[in-house]
Amino acid sequence: MTEKTVLNATHRALGARMVDFGGWDMPINYGSQIEEHHAVRRDAGMFDVSHMTVIDLHGARTREFLRHLLANSVDKLKVVGKALYSCMLNEQGGVIDDLIVYYLGEEFFRLVVNAGTRAKDLAWIEQQAATFEVQVKERPEFAMIAVQGPNARAKVLGLLHDVDRPRIEKLGKFAAAAAQGPHGMPLFVARTGYTGEDGFEIIVPAEHAVALWEALVAAGVVPAGLGARDTLRLEAGMNLYGQDMDESVLPWEANLGWTIALDEGRAFIGRAALEQQKAAGVPRVMVGLVLDDKGVLRHGQSVLTANGAGEILSGSFAPTLNKAVAFARIPAGEPGDVRVDIRGREVPVRLVKYPFVRDGKPCEGI
Amino acid sequence: MSEIPGDLKFLKSHEWARAEDDGLVRVGISDHAQGQLGDLVYVELPEVGSAVKAGTGAAVVESVKAASDIYSPVSGEVVEVNELLNDKPEIINEDAFGEGWIFLVRPSDRAELDELLDANEYEELIENEDH
């Protein structure tokens, strides 16, 4: 049974090409994925991300619970409304999921996790929460719209109630706050995203989602499909769960070391395995690749290095760069000349530091 | 979706063939196929002078989403390729049945054309695919 977001009929009315995305019937594009990609880089676009799972955590020991559950440290969250990106690991250090946690009160935190991992995440979180007496509550009554691009914030701000506008305008990156949208609808506005552009991710009660979407269209925000979302996040150097990391991968091997907080005395799940691998030496590393020749790097292609073979994780044509880029996991050590096997042809690629694109422009050396 | 021109013949894998007045056969992919693939970003053309065989891969089109083999509807020799696609693969998205043609074949067995689907049969095929 395919699930549908509350915006399903809206997408179809806009002529979206719909695909199955982790059990959800979602728009891959509304005509041209490349044009939607450019709209986000140059102006403002929006994505229906209502398939993502919102989980609220309540209880006196919620922060203590999250210190145990997450590999990043919730003690970095000192001001109400602040958000943190983290991995949730198993005991072996493998990544169960990546998520955003919002600090909404000393006894109230909110998680936004991936759609494709919803069931296992909920089961894991509930299992771990029991001993901390934390209440785990999924919020399926919410929809979510990500509005992204250099003009995204201005267009959203124009729809907010006058009393909320100055406060939301001042909202810092990776912070969230409540505000009233069109017709007084209650919004949870977060200055986060998955495109490498500024913007907001807005959680809205499902019954108001269509009205919000239509107000955003009227404000000049371009509907964009999950196809564009994928090329935008790849250019921005952001991992995709299931493609760039999963339970067989430790964060060190997925360039997620920056999200690991080995703060003293905090016994989070997976910590021992992480420290052990770090001490022993990380066997594989994740790198960025650029193909200057014609062709497209794609998931699953073999990457040939001096130390043996690796593989392409996320790979695609990058519309901002007009060439193909990819993440690859390869054996650690000096890789020498790197080549990719594209349909039986060995094609030279360049190893680069990513992100590939930042603030709408190609990064240096890409 | 644009109208399917009545003079075209099709493979089930969505390539079209048009018998030209000079006896050559022009080959492309259908408008339905370009829509399924999404924005095209790269076309690997066959070499002029190379031999192609009916029902086997002769070219490759890559969209943002996926790479697809393009089968030749007829056997023969490639006499011309659409060089414009090297720089502007999106021509196929814009005009799949016209300017977006891919290669031109001098067929070795014109009877192979009779084995292809006609426009009505192809239309029926994609209608069934959509449901």
Image: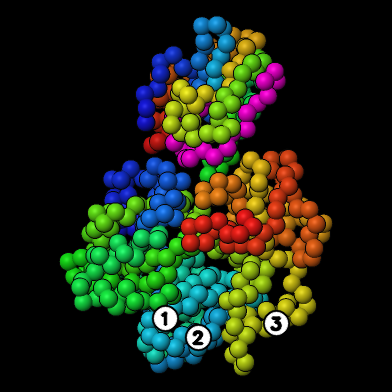
Q: Chain of mark 2?
A: A
Q: Is residue A131 above or below residue A121?
A: below
Q: CA distance from mark 1 to mark 2?
A: 9 Å
Q: Residues within 10 Å of mark 2 (few under 14, many from 20)?
A: few
Residue for point 54% across, 58% down: A357
Q: CA distance from mark 3 to mark 1?
A: 28 Å
Q: CA distance from mark 2 to mark 3?
A: 21 Å
| Residue A46 image point, x, y percent | 36, 57
Q: Are marks 1 and 2 on the same chain?
A: yes
What residue sits right under mark 3 in the picture? A275
Q: Earlier in the sequence, mark 1 or mark 2?
A: 2
The image quadrant where one finds the N terminus of chain A is bottom left
Q: Earlier in the sequence, mark 3 or mark 1?
A: 1
Residue A282 found in image quarter? bottom right
Side of A178 relative to A249 (left or right): left
What residue sits right under mark 1 in the picture? A82
Q: Amino acid at mark 2?
A: Lys
Q: Are marks 1 and 2 in contact (CB under 8 Å)?
A: yes
Q: Secondary structure at mark 3?
A: helix
What residue sits right under mark 2 in the picture? A76
Closer to the camera, B94 or A128? B94
Q: Chain of mark 3?
A: A
Residue B33, can we see it?
no
Residue for point 80% across, 63% down: A334
Q: Are marks 3 and 1 on the same chain?
A: yes
Q: Amino acid at mark 1?
A: Lys
| Residue A301 image point, x, y percent | 67, 49
Q: Is residue A93 above or below residue B116?
A: below
Q: Chain of mark 1?
A: A
Q: Are marks 2 and 3 on the same chain?
A: yes
Identify the magenta region: B28-50
Between marks 2 and 3 in the image, the one whose residue lies nearer the viewer: 2
